[in-house]
Image (tube, helix red, strand yellow):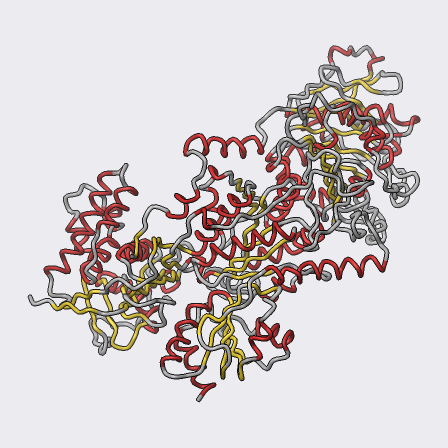
Amino acid sequence: MEQNNQVIDNVIIKFAGDSGDGMQLTGTQFTNTAALFGNDLSTFPDFPAEIRAPQGTIPGVSGYQLHFGSVSIFTPGDECDVLVAMNAAALKANMRFLKKGGTIIANTDGFDPKNLRLANYADGANPILDGSLEGYRLVTMDVTKMTRSALSESGLGIKEIDRAKNMFVLGFLYWMYNRDMSATEKFLTEKFGKKPDILDANLKVLRSGYNFGETSETAATRYTVNPAPMPAGVYRNIMGNQATAMGLIAASQKCGLDMFLGSYPITPATDILHELAKYKNFGVRTYQAEDEIAAICSAIGASFGGKLAVTTSSGPGIALKTEAMGLALMLELPLVIINVQRGGPSTGLPTKTEQSDLFQAIYGRNGEAPIPVIAARSAADCFDTVFEACRLALEFMTPVIFLSDGYIANGSEPWRFPKADQLKEIKVNFTTENNNDGKYLPYKRDEKLSRPWAIPGTKGLEHRIGGLEKQHETGNISYDPENHEFMVKMRAAKVAKIADFVPNQTLDNGAEKGKLLILGWGSTYGPIKGAVIEARKKGYDVSHAHIRHLFPFPKNLGEMIKNFDQVLIPEMNTGQLLSIVRDKFLVDAIGLNKVKGMPFATGEILNKIEELLK
Amino acid sequence: METIQSPESPKLTSKDLVTDQEVRWCPGCGDYSILKQVQTVVPELDIPRENLVFISGIGCSSRFPYYMETFGMHSIHGRATAIASGLKGARPDLSVWIISGDGDSLSIGGNHFIHLLRRNFNVNLLMFNNEIYGLTKGQYSPTSEEGKITKSTPMGSVDHPFNPLALALGAEGSFIARSMDRDPVHLKDMLRRANAHIGTSFVEIYQNCNVFNDGTFEIFTEKSSKKEQTIFVENGKPLVYGQNADKGIKLDGFTPVIVNLSDGHSANDLWIHDEKDLVKAGILSRFFERPAEGSGHLPRPFGVFYENNRSCYEVGLNQQVEEAIAKKGKGNLDALLSGRETWEIK
């Protein structure tokens, strides 16, 4: 038949199926292929909290959204162009994310009476047969049947055969988007190299899916999405948690200290522990502690011993670490505390994203307890930001909180990675000489107000530190009222001074003066960036600044804000940065807030810009 | 735990371990004796002073590091064990001593306590047990007896106490011992043994709080009753005690039975203490009756109940790093950053 080839500049595909259907793998494979081809892209996995919710039900639906294009891509996209639905529940759960007139690729076997019932469709209703999807482009195929017939002579059991279903869909999509399958073939060969029968089955089904596209009359159109114009350089695809792990290793190499990670498994931070555990040959020691408290305390012990100490967690775990964070601050030891935020409060929405731990990071401790806070804005930016967190911790002898969130932690994007020698060295000087005529002064400060780091094993510098208030310079216990106030102010001044050593806030887009500044932090970067580009195309006077250093703020931030008539702060919380900015700069900033466990859609921000500037 | 000595270091004296800080325990507190015994024993161990680290939690006992002229950390309640685990994991070369109390180790820090023993880091854990919360001015602790009347339990505590040694055995502890503040010779011996053991050495030290729980261990520590109410166990020796060493313990199956040696029972029939025997250590740890008036109950044991040698966490942790380096070579940052698949845009 006649096949039509259409060139498009971007497309959003959502892969949705049962959590056992392998949709995450299908999505990642397509992503890698698109990345290698040179498309810009952004991804967002959306999986249930339950590992295996009952098969065929809506709670069991696992999704993976990929946005790729020949143009710059900033977000995984608001609504998808193509929805792959492996069963009725996947369709039902995702219809609201599909564009009007979008394409549905449905596995008919997943729409049998049992699946329809499990997805709570009314008796007798079947969306792929009853015309209720009118207005959409419906492509149906019996993936199960075709997979089974492709493997009828493989000798494999039905369970193993059905497990290859996702490869059929992947093959079909590769055909539909004119993709080369060699990256996936290579991946499968590495994954199943030791199980030749499984490898053959997967390769065969992958090709069957591709050939099905070629020969069937199901979908008449193929699409070409050309490579995107991106700055010259060598790229790879990276997920946020992976970038965080790499940033930590890079910092460890650049400061010359082995890394010690104390951690306790928690969604969505655990992958950082998994990643780091693979890299012991970089001198990384990972310690899976008995609880969140032991995780941070072990890291404090390692820091006392002279290592680059790190603890990783998410909101509820951070809550448990709070007291120990106060200790690290009193001890003035370097420590990097990573919070991959998720929906809260309490257990909240473990697999969903939110930015609601900013107050917790900045204020959430007993006493006057200032700890620097910095946040990453995208998957790749986790690398640079966590590297910066390590630098601040080591150069200023302080715990530092690094904020990421579920959206960028599991999302991926192309990354023009640096060369090792382009990364700045981080200066660490263990003190080996007495800094005093008499006894060594563990709390004698330098020009940064930072104290010396004399580690156990250093002859003549034996000293004691602890959580009780300490006397200026000597570090001895002190209950003197004047000294306490002095030390409280000193610790605050030390953290405030960090602002002298961080870059000024810059604008990401737009003029330095104008009608509207959008101020963002963390993972709202992509949607804000996309919205501001759109708005400026439409002629709106809007600028965008994205804050990495949240505490202390860059020194020029107040001045920057005052150059705009209005300030809009979009956040995935009820207005935390908003309160801080209003408090700190006495500016009547406006919030745009979303707490649905979902990232902003570019359109939501664009609408707000239009509303404010109309 | 044992740490390799450094031959060129000049010999330490106990004076070298005294800090310039005024010791602030109540006059008459049992902690003074423990501090003194530690300061006496440590110089014998030939560990360079800069390699010694004392880590404590919160409580009266936890002021200890401030009085030791070594590296030290006075941390937060219950967490000294967790901090020491990280330190030892990161720095196996150090001699790490944890100073804790019954509330610190068994109540707020109970979780870290059992996991430290299970992992068997090569550290020493000295738990000063005074069966009371002293620093907060006298509330019952997880080792206080049932019915204990304190400010928080005016009608008597309804809590059943822990048996710390049985708990430590259950948590896979590899060195379990008990001593007391009032027996300096025995305490010093236990400290030496603890240091010599490779693995987590847990020493429970009965310590008198003369302000909030005075005399709680008096029956074990006072000359008049000590010999009848305690038994000091030694490896390979029969379980003999009593005013005139005239009583012994014999095992009838798994049941310990008191026998009178003057009744014609021979010391040859008695239970011979074997520190390697986990089953017997379990039985011995259950000699835990509250001393009643009169006789007939089992005496309270002191000494090393159990010792075995098994691998230490920090050894495995660091071996894996070495193995990974041997297998894959030292990490190459550029290779890590580029990963397996890259593409170039020109």
Q: Quadrant of residue A554?
A: bottom right
- Where is residue B283? Give x, y as percent: 69, 27
Which of the pair B34/A134 is nearer the observer? B34
The residue located at (66%, 24%) in the rendering is B4
- Where is residue A609? Give x, y as percent: 44, 82
Could you tell whether A33 is left or right of A346 in the image? left
Q: Is any atom of residue A542 visible in this view?
A: yes
Which of the pair B259/A508 is nearer the observer? A508
Q: In which quarter of the image is the N terminus of chain B?
A: top right
Name the residue furthest bottom.
A614
The residue located at (79%, 43%) in the rendering is A436
Which of the pair A458/A85 is nearer the observer? A458
- Above or below A430: residue A343: below
Could you tell whether A272 is left or right of B131 in the image? left
Q: Is any atom of residue B112 visible in this view?
A: no
Could you tell whether A26 is left or right of A261 in the image? left
Which of the pair A585/B293 is nearer the observer? A585
- Where is residue A203? Give x, y as percent: 20, 47
- Where is residue A363? Give x, y as percent: 65, 64
Q: How many marks?
A: 0
The residue located at (87%, 23%) in the rendering is B227
Q: In which quarter of the image is the C terminus of chain B?
A: bottom left
Could you tell whether B180 is left or right of A245 in the image? right
- Above or below A520: residue B150: above
